[in-house]
């Protein structure tokens, strides 16, 4: 284990934090965003939404009786849902279109974006609950600590 | 399905009281990793090689017939100075299997230490190595501060904080 004087340590911290920042931008943040997208997909598929970031998750508003009847007749209804299950899944297009890049989590494709906007009025889902945010923070903390150990 | 005693499948590991909740979580995970690594090498918690019992159905030398039993091993709880490791759900199949290995019952009513394969726990030497490794890699306050800054910036960019 290397020993530093206080001045050397401060200099080293600055140097290493620049490397960490670069790694964050190049890969770690992308992984965190993928985890966020996956969290939203999985929780929504289970029938829960989140009204705003850091709010508790809530059961998605139930489907109307008319819509349940329509879904019952739908031969292409996804195996990830059932006629009466409210989980923003009919043909499995919306949740499948939740994606991420190096910058953000987003809905891919104009049509799915329009659908997401429409359904979000009554069934908001593109947010993270407090426990979900905590999971992301834990992931980032662990990844950053690995980088400290790698470079310091 | 019930086990004979909770103490057969849950073990308290004493650690210095200076470690806080976050420290204990990480140390607990390091203890589990050590047990899995040692067990896969066919060594029990006393540092002895698992004994092969002739004619026994339970002849696995690394307790990994399906992997389910070892997958369920984890940190049960922790409080100041103590980390409890083992099987949280003491009524599970995995906890029953683990007890069979720990005390050598293997479905029989009486225990038999000569065929037991105790694996839950770490020796004092193993614990000392784990704690030394943890102390070495634990981030300093300055590092934690910088880490918090990075995370806060990311969360703000995502409109979460």
Image: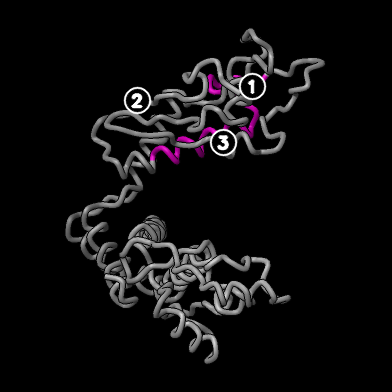
Q: Are marks 3 and 1 in contact (CB under 8 Å)?
A: no
Asked if badge 2 and badge 3 are on a common chain, one would say yes
Q: Can residue B87 be seen in the rendering of this structure?
A: yes
Residue B93: x %, y % from top left: 62, 30
The residue at the point 67 percent across, 13 percent down is: B115
- Residue density around tag 1, few if under 14, some if 14–19, many if 20 or more, within 10 Å: some
The mark nearer the N terminus, 3 or 1, is 3
Chain of the residue under label 3: B
Q: Which residue is mark 1?
A: B49
Determine which quarter of the picture holds residue A125: bottom left
Check whether the beta carbons of the residues at disc 1 and disc 2 lie within 8 A of each other. Answer: no
Q: Nearer the viewer, residue B110 or A73?
A: A73
**Looking at the picture, does residue B56 appear above or below residue B39?**
above
Q: Mark 3 vs mark 1: tell me if same chain.
A: yes
Q: Residue A151, how many percent across, how many down?
A: 38, 61
Q: Which residue carries the number 3 mark?
A: B36
> What residue is rendered at 27% in x and 31% in y?
B80
* Secondary structure type for disc 2: strand
Chain hosting mark 1: B
Magenta segment range?
B27-50
Few, some or many C-alpha atoms within 10 Å of disc 3 (few <14, some 14-19, many ≥20)? some
Task: Depth check: give the residue in front, B53 or B77.
Answer: B77
- Return the mark for residue B107: none
């Amino acid at each position: 284990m290397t020993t530093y004087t206080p001045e050397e340590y401060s200099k080293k911290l600055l140097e290493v934090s620049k490397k960490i920042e670069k790694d964050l931008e190049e890969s770690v943040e992308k992984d965190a965003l993928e985890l966020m997208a996956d969290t939203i997909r999985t929780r929504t598929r289970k029938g829960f939404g989140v009204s705003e970031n850091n709010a508790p998750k809530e059961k998605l508003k139930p489907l109307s009786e008319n819509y349940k009847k329509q879904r019952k007749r739908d031969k292409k209804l996804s195996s990830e849902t059932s006629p009466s299950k409210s989980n923003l899944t009919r043909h499995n297009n919306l949740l499948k279109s939740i994606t991420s890049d190096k910058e953000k989590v987003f809905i891919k494709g104009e049509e799915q974006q329009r659908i997401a906007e429409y359904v979000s009025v009554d069934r908001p889902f593109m947010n993270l609950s407090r426990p979900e945010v905590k999971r992301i923070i834990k992931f980032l903390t662990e990844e950053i600590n690995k980088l400290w150990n790698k470079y310091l | 399905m019930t086990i004979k005693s909770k103490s057969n499948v849950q073990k308290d590991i004493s650690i210095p009281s200076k470690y806080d909740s976050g420290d204990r979580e990480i140390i607990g995970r390091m203890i589990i990793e050590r047990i899995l690594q040692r067990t896969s090498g066919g060594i029990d918690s006393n540092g002895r090689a698992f004994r092969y019992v002739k004619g026994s159905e339970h002849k696995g030398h690394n307790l990994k017939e399906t992997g389910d039993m070892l997958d369920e091993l984890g940190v049960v709880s922790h409080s100041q100075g103590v980390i409890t490791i083992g099987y949280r759900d003491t009524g599970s199949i995995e906890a029953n299997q683990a007890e069979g290995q720990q005390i050598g019952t293997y479905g029989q009513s009486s225990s038999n230490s000569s065929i037991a394969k105790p694996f839950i726990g770490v020796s004092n030497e193993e614990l000392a190595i784990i704690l030394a490794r943890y102390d070495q890699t634990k981030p300093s306050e300055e590092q934690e501060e910088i880490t918090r800054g990075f995370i806060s910036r990311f969360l703000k960019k995502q409109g979460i904080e």
